[in-house]
Image (spheres, helix red, strand yellow):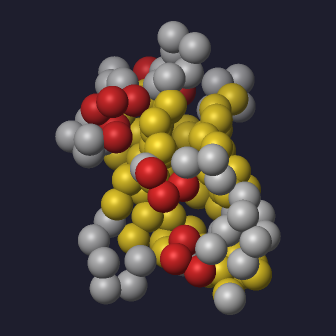
Amino acid sequence: VQLQASGGGLVQAGGSLRLSCAASGRTFTSYAMGWFRQAPGKEREFVAAIGRWSGFITYYTDSVKGRFTISRDNAKSTVYLQMNRLKPEDTAVYYCAAGLASDATSVRDGFGVDYWGKGTQVTVSS
C-alpha cells in the first residue's frame, strides 16, 4: 500500500488542522491505521490509531486525548486526524502508518505497522 499524507501547515496555538492520509493499493479495510509524529531531536512517538472494523476502536496518546480525533472513511480509503486546540509542543512531522491484517492495539504499540507514509509538517506557533 502507498500512503500519501497531507494537510500539515503553520497554525497559531489554539488553532486547528486536519491531516489526511490517502491509501492506494490493497483493500483499505485490510489495514489498521495510525498516526505518529517526530519532533526535532526526539524519537518518533505514537499519536493515534484506529481499527479496521468492529466499531473503529481508537487509541490516543495521553497528551492529545480530548483534542485530537482519528477517523477513517473506508469508501475513500482515507484516514484523518482532526487536531484541535493545538499547542506548540504538537509541532512535529506527522506520519501516517498502516498495519496489514493488524489491529489498533498493535499499531499503537508499534509492532503492527507494515507501511509508513512520508511525513507532513505541522508547526504550531505560540
Up-down: is 123 above or below 47?
below
Q: Position of residue 14 (x, y in %)?
A: 76, 71
Residue at 52% across / 77% down in the picture? Answer: 89
Left/right of residue 13 with respect to residue 116 in the rendered view: right
Residue 102 in sight from this viewpoint: yes
Up-down: is 78 above or below 42?
above
Point out the residue furthest to the left here.
Answer: 111
Residue 100 in sight from this viewpoint: no
Up-down: is 105 above or below 94?
above
- Picture mark count: 0
Q: Position of residue 36 (x, y in %)?
A: 42, 56
Residue at 27% across / 71% down in the picture? Answer: 43
Point out the residue furthest to the bottom here.
Answer: 126
Point out the residue furthest to the top here.
Answer: 54
**Which image quadrant: the C terminus?**
bottom right
Residue at 70% across / 23% down in the picture? Answer: 75
Up-down: is 108 above or below 124?
above
Residue at 64% across / 35% down in the picture? Answer: 71
Q: Position of residue 21 (x, y in %)?
A: 60, 49
Q: Position of residue 80 (x, y in %)?
A: 65, 44
Q: Quadrant of residue 105?
A: top left
**Which image quadrant: the N terminus?**
top left
